[in-house]
Amino acid sequence: MNHHSIGTKHILLGLIGEGDGAAARALASFGVSLEAARQQVSSITEPGSVPQPASPPFTPRAKKVLELALRESLAADDTEIGTRHLLLGLVREGRGVGAQVLVKLGVGLAQVRPSVLHVEDPPGPRQGAAAASGASAPGPDPADLAARLSQAELQIAAMEERNRELLRRVQLLLGLIPRGDWPDWAQEEFG
């Protein structure tokens, strides 16, 4: 396609082309094929004119889809982001070319969630090996990560509040000193 960046259309085509994941199977249940999706992408977007670098950047909408996919994974208490989460992120974003293609192919975006939630992702290489050995899949616990993130946000908020209080105290103390007698740093910061 020679596009300058990776967009939602590429995420959709990748999900369909992967073929075995929950997203591909859910979309197949709506009659969505890779060829039909490619035709719709071609009708909406222009192909690039020159070959692109090996690692083109993600568009803002594609980044949003990835962020929403992470949120879907965390909300489901899953340990990995699977194809279902990517498809749900694409549908939640709802305005990119990927979502437009689904609508043009007759897929109601509201229909995707219940459909994809009923289809299981096949085990990946790490999941398969873990299941064979009787161990759980490796990786951080999303609930633990969310709790640690919340705790870090609370600590940052407390530090910001403390800094505001210290600044207020410095300003009060400086108000007791005639302006000409302030230290150089105070003149620069508050003068």
Image (cartoon, grey):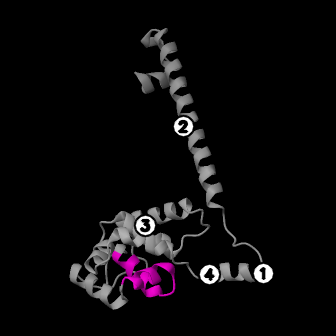
Q: Quadrant of the C terminus?
A: top left
Please give the name of the residue rendered at 59% of the width and 50% of the height, measured from the top-left corner: 149
Element carrying mark 3: helix
Question: What residue is pinned by disc 1?
Answer: 133
Q: Nearer the viewer, mark 4 or mark 2?
A: 4
Q: Quadrant of the N terminus?
A: bottom left
Question: What residue is pinned by disc 3?
Answer: 89
Question: What residue is pinned by disc 4?
Answer: 123
Task: Check residue 127 for magenta coloring.
Answer: no
Q: Position of residue 56 (x, y in %)?
A: 39, 75
The kind of secondary structure the magenta stretch mainly shows is helix
Element carrying mark 4: loop
Q: Is residue 147 above or below residue 97?
A: above
Please give the name of the residue rendered at 50% of the width and 27% of the height, measured from the top-left corner: 164
Q: Is residue 12 above or below residue 79?
A: below
Please give the name of the residue rendered at 67% of the width and 68% of the height, measured from the top-left corner: 139
Stretch of the chain drawn in magenta: 9-30
Q: Which circle's residue, 2 or 1, is located before the other in the chain?
A: 1
Rounded to the nearest angstrom, the CA distance separating label 4 from label 2 is 40 Å
Rounded to the nearest angstrom, the CA distance separating label 1 from label 4 is 13 Å
Which amino acid lies under the numbered mark 3 shown in the image of this protein? Answer: Gly
Evaluate if marks 4 and 3 touch, with contact meaning CB atoms under 8 Å apart.
no
Q: Which mark is residue 157?
A: 2
